[in-house]
Amino acid sequence: MTSNPVHQGIDLRVFARYRGDFTEEADVVVVGSGPGGAVVAHGLVEKGLRVVLVEEGPPIPPADFEFDGGMSMARTMREGGLRTTRGTVMPTMQAIALGGGSLVNSAICVRAPEFVLDRWSRDYELNKTTRTELDPHYDAVGAFLGISPTPEDVQGARNLLFRDGCDALGYSSEPIARNVRGCRGSGECFTGCRSRAKQSMDISYVHEALEAGACVLTSARVENVLASGHRVSGVEGHVVEPFTGRPRYRFRVNAKVVVLAAGCMATPVLLQKSGGLANRSGQVGENLRFHPGVAAMGTFPDRVDPQFGATQGYQSLEFIKRGFKLETLWAPPTIFAVRLPGSGMAFKERLGDLPYSAVWDAIGSCNRSVGRVRARFRGNDPKLSWKLHPEDVGLLMEALYRLAEIFFAAGAHTVLPGVSGLPEEMHTLEAADVLRTHEVPASSLVLGGNHAFCSTRMHGDPRRGVVDESGRCHDFENLYVADTGIFPECPSVNPMWTGMALAHRTAGCIADRI
Ligand SMILES: Cc1cc2nc3c(=O)[nH]c(=O)nc-3n(C[C@H](O)[C@H](O)[C@H](O)COP(=O)(O)OP(=O)(O)OC[C@H]3O[C@@H](n4cnc5c(N)ncnc54)[C@H](O)[C@@H]3O)c2cc1C
Ligand code: SF4
């Protein structure tokens, strides 16, 4: 293999610029450019280390964003956005692009509550993972990305009605803090922020890492971690065509340290396909957990024009200890349309209600609902099994009731809870009571689970977890994991900031040890 030529200035390799097989040398190779990998790569290059960041997806600039939801998913998401769990069927989306999930997410940043981190510390022997220990890492990431509450002038009616409903009921609510600078409230975070207000990794941590001298290989899929005894020596894989994934050239990166940040689904698959690495505990790919989400639509007498306003601008943590978080939501209408009941004229009339409607969602902290990630016999996509626990079905139904309650308190005349077997629409809170009194099977709920964790969990005891508190695999001296797979349980709030805080800590630990 020969060395690929390093380009003048910034060393960002894109598919069209690869010329053949190549080998790179690095102090640290980081696999995956999502929130976890980007933070680690930046932290280490800042310390003067030679960092190679490898990302399977291509860079996707604003000119290539697709405004249509389906078209966008086909380009930015793994399996075209159609990945689901088996057992309880739930769609789950993972991005494939420079920046990982940060390119398509709503930029919501919430620190994991103290009671959650106390439980992690106690139950998983993690003495240095309390909120006090993690706050400096949250602070550092927050300052770098400009994380701050969504200002009122970009909230739009969809978000402010939620606040009004919570106020009327005496429930706490607040503007959501996000990693954005200069948001104009266009509500299109899901298909990519065309105004580049969202500080996704490609324009924040990865960009700064490139400026500081990192080499970033895009359209490069890692397929094997090279290991011998208790040490790893690098990774190898193929340059792949964007969007088709067809392999083109071979590459290898030799490194003193390997950091896997390929995401909660891909990292366990990579370990499994590399000969079953880091699995003396038997926990690689086990313990998969989600924040399953449910959503309800409320229709108001006056226009809401829900397409205007920050994608997710308001939240309520009123029920966080009960086990769910409430938020406002927006996505391209095609995404919501598939959830609307009816067909023909009835469906057409529902679509006509959209300008008068708002969609709000709830995410459940469902630790009882557990699954597993396994490598498929062929290909690199995971096989996901997961089951929503009956008590968590009840929890999500209660969350839907609370959403209905807030809708009616905000002045909605109709609520569509989207639960099969129950009335399609409800006009009073009394009618909505059925949401918390009627038992339904998991299959009655329209679920979505884009927050995924725990598949390579952190545990102080090497017999019960894959990595230690620094993110280092218990079985290896120089192999680390830095994605949300290391969470020991659900964080109860949106995971990205916690993932980045842990990655920030991991970068510091690696720099101290190398
Ligand atoms: C639509 C959507 C909205 C969301 N909204 C929010 C939100 O507002 N706030 C929040 O906190 N969370 C949100 N999330 C979740 C959040 O985006 C993820 O938790 C976060 O991106 C996880 O970061 P990560 O670094 O662990 O993994 P990822 O972001 O998944 O990054 C992993 C990267 O590794 C790459 N990769 C995988 N395998 C390989 C390989 N073999 N070789 C090379 N590269 C590889 C992937 O292409 C990807 O870019 C959302 C998720 C989605 C899908
Ligand atoms: S709401 Fe619009 S402008 Fe604001 S961060 Fe999202 S996509 Fe960008």
Image (cartoon, grey):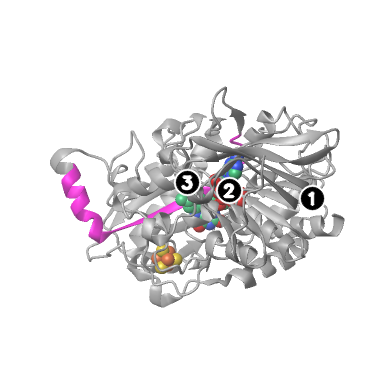
Q: Within 10 angstroms of label 3, few (less than 14), some, or many (20 or more) residues?
A: many
Percent position (x, y) of residue 388? 53, 34
* Left or right, residue 131 beside residue 269: right
The residue drawn where x is 63% and y is 61% is: 111
Ligand 2 placement by image quarter: bottom left
Q: Secondary structure at mark 1?
A: loop
Q: Which residue is mark 3?
A: 293
Contact check, label 3 and label 1, Cβ < 8 Å:
no
Q: Per the image, is 354 magenta? A: yes
Let me know if residue 290 appears in the view: no
Q: Within 10 angstroms of label 1, few (less than 14), some, or many (20 or more) residues?
A: many
Contact check, label 1 and label 2, Cβ < 8 Å:
no
Percent position (x, y) of residue 431? 32, 47
Residue at disc 2, CB closer than 8 Å to ligand 1 = yes
Quarter of the image with the C terminus is: bottom right
Q: Going by the picture, which residue comes out furthest to the top? A: 377
Residue 272 occupies quadrant: top right
Residue in the foreground of this view, choosing between 373 and 131: 373
Of tags 3 and 2, the one toward the viewer is 2
Magenta highlight range? 347-370
Q: Which residue is mark 2?
A: 55
* Left or right, residue 373 beside residue 407: right
Q: Mark 3 to mark 2: distance in Å?
A: 28 Å
Q: Which residue is mark 1?
A: 469
